[in-house]
Image (cartoon, rainbow, N blue to C red):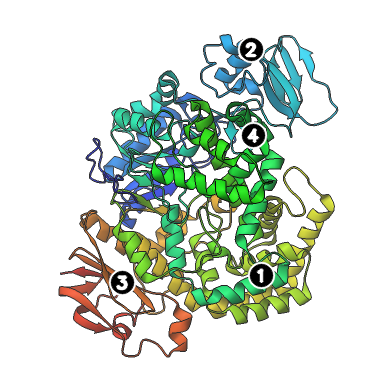
Amino acid sequence: MSEGSEGSEGSEGSCPAPLSTYRVQLTPDFGFAEVAELAPYLRDLGVGHVYLSPILQATPHSRHGYDVTDHSRIREEFGGLEGLRALSETLTAYGLGVVVDIVPNHMTIPVPETGNRQLWSVLREGRASPYASWFDIDWDGGGGRVNMPVLGDAVEPVADGGVLRYHEHEFPLPGIHYRLVDWREGPGYRRFFDVSSLIGLRVEDPAVFDATHEVILSLVEAGVVHGLRVDHPDGLADPRGYLARLREASGVWTVAEKILVGPERLPADWDCDGTTGYEVLNRITRLFVDPAGRKPLVELFAARTGMPRDYAAVVRRSKREVLDLFFSAEIDRLHAVVGSDRETLVELLAAMPVYRAYAVPGEPVPAISAEIVEQAGRVAAARLPEGAPVAEVVDRVLYGPAEAVIRFQQTCGPVMAKGVEDTALYRWYPLSCLNEVGGEPDRFDGTVDGFHAFCREMAPGTMTTLSTHDTKRSEDVRARLAVLSELPHEWAAAVGEWSAKVSFDPVLDHLAWQNLMAAWPIGEDRFFEYLFKAAREAKTSISWATPDPGYERGIRDFVTRAVDECGASVAEFAAVIEPYARSNSLGQKLVQLMMPGVPDLYWGNEITDFSLVDPDNRRPVDFARRRALLAGGPAGPGRSWDEDKLLVTTRALHLRRRLDPALPYVPIEAGEHAVAFARGDRAVAVATRLPVGLARRGGWGSDTITLPHGSWRDLLSGAEHTGRIPLAHLLSALPVALLERE
């Protein structure tokens, strides 16, 4: 986190940062009234703020809310404005605030299209529409008409009065401002990634910003909303300018869903408190992965799948494929303003290692931004014929016309998202707990010292997380998978046994076995839906655009046989590794809740959750079970994994409420198999890591930890400690300890 990412005390605005957040996925059957019923439970859990998925009016049946149709209304299916006000009042009565997820980058193109009145006006009136400035439309490239990619069969659109109908689609007549084209063609507008039903907004226009944010900002002004989460800022023409305008208008704690890769840091001039925490998630995961597992797991993966050992080669091929498959329209529009050679531009996009390089037209290009693009140019040059105008293209996207600089920045993100997140991460997966948003699956190199250095740089207002609505796997699935880095040979034997009984497609099978074991027990339908999505994302045999009913039947048959014929053995393997997975689960939870930042809990993950990628991770949560566990209080030595995780979660959250979030992060030496740190002189967290290796060496032996001066009480076990303590004693009850100074 950069030095510029501050503000946890609300120094930039009227509302301080939350002490913690609890993400809730609103749906038509789980709206504001249902969230209000959770208020007593969330208060007792120790939560500070409830963090709501998007609340503006979306398509009626949407189960995520990112497909906004009307910025002037709170979503009716959730209870509307009155329901939201009532929810905020209830939460306030229980000492809880409200954080809201907002979507400035795009709106949806609903079916029928009349559901978006601003877009309907533009389709009817073209550039003369009062809403023409709202949308990022390529009028010039389309000859004054916008391409609408909806056609998918031989059925002819039919005129019906003043409307042109095509199946469920509706368009205004006469159709002089739009053109219906095949659904596989690129649209005549900027879109969210490759999703043509989500049209880009021009919030860089102050009038568009005001119109699309009026309701949200009025809720902030009224004290109904106390914090904001900004979805996909990299899609915007000017993320820095947008965040500055938003901060000035709202004055509240704000985090941005910025995906950082490797050593990348949030731009210091972004006026927000931090990110939504994917870089933290990946750092924590690697802390519990054994680097020694890399070689045998990569060898196993390559042998089983036939895929290359080199992840970078898979990334490069994946990005080139998605550029060719999905982004021809975007490249055409970019090439029209950049000029020079189109193929050179494509290779430069494929070589970009991050989602955006942050050059701003009319300003000196930051040295780090220039280096990123210039290095990508050197990579691209090695792939292009000699004499390709790489330097010219690099110069144009860094220092050229404003639209060239901006459009290049806006195109990098979709290529990274579709090429890496939604393709390469489904193709290259020696250890799939590393295959997360912003993750680097070829890096098994998490170290305690590196983690401490990372934490010391963090700002107190940035969000931290372990699971989200967008993670590829829940935190506890990853906790199980991390154990495989310590048991690569045992894992190879198990996969060999299962594959000898059931096989289908080697490129998919190896991913299937990892996730079947890590999500066990999982029903056939859930497992099938996961594998079906994974196969379409990988695009090695089928894709969203190229279905194959025969292949799909093969996946279904594989799932049925894998569960029926290998389920007992899979369950046995999961049981064998459970003590180690449980240690990882509790360890990563304690670390996330006690490190600097604002810890977020994804709903339901206060106990174990073995969910896979969406929509699996957006299933309803059994709050009755969680309430009962919390009301029952801590049990004795025979506690379940659920009970232990709930204990760690609630004790840590309540402790955070007693601590100053700006307390310094102080590393504590604890040896190879533990990570330990203090928060000032008030709290100490200790977590076991690499538990298989610890067991193989015979336990803690004579290893000790020296606590800071004073008397300390373990909030998990009740034991009191001072000075130098044997780790075997400190961690005798649980693989983690949470100490508060008395």
Q: Nearer the viewer, mark 4 or mark 1?
A: 4
- The local secondary structure at tag 3 comes to strand
Q: Position of residue 649 (x, y in %)?
A: 36, 62
Amino acid of disc 2: Arg
**Label 1 sits on residue:** 301
Earlier sequence position, callout 4 versus callout 2? 2
Amino acid of disc 4: Ile
Q: Position of residue 323 (x, y in %)?
A: 66, 42
Quadrant position of residue 601:
bottom left
Res 324 label:
none
Is label 4 in contact with label 3 (beta carbons under 8 Å)?
no
Earlier sequence position, callout 3 versus callout 1? 1
Q: Of all residues shown, which one is farthest toward the front?
A: 387
Q: Position of residue 267 (x, y in %)?
A: 37, 43
Earlier sequence position, callout 4 versus callout 1? 1
Q: What residue appears at the point 68 percent right and 35 percent down from the top-left corner?
A: 328
**Label 3 sits on residue:** 676
Q: Is residue 186 visible?
A: yes
Res 331 label:
4
How far apart are the two marked residues, 4 and 2, measured between alpha carbons? 27 Å
Q: Residues within 10 Å of mark 3 (few under 14, many from 20)?
A: many
Earlier sequence position, callout 4 versus callout 3? 4
How far apart are the two marked residues, 1 and 2, measured between alpha carbons? 54 Å
Q: Residues within 10 Å of mark 1 (few under 14, many from 20)?
A: many
Q: How crowded is mark 2: few (under 14 residues within 10 Å), some or many (20 or more)?
A: some
Amino acid of disc 3: Ala
How far apart are the two marked residues, 3 and 1, measured between alpha carbons? 33 Å
How far apart are the two marked residues, 3 and 2, measured between alpha carbons? 62 Å
Can you say whether 192 is above or below 661 in the image?
A: above
**Label 2 sits on residue:** 124
- The local secondary structure at tag 4 comes to helix
Quadrant position of residue 626:
bottom left
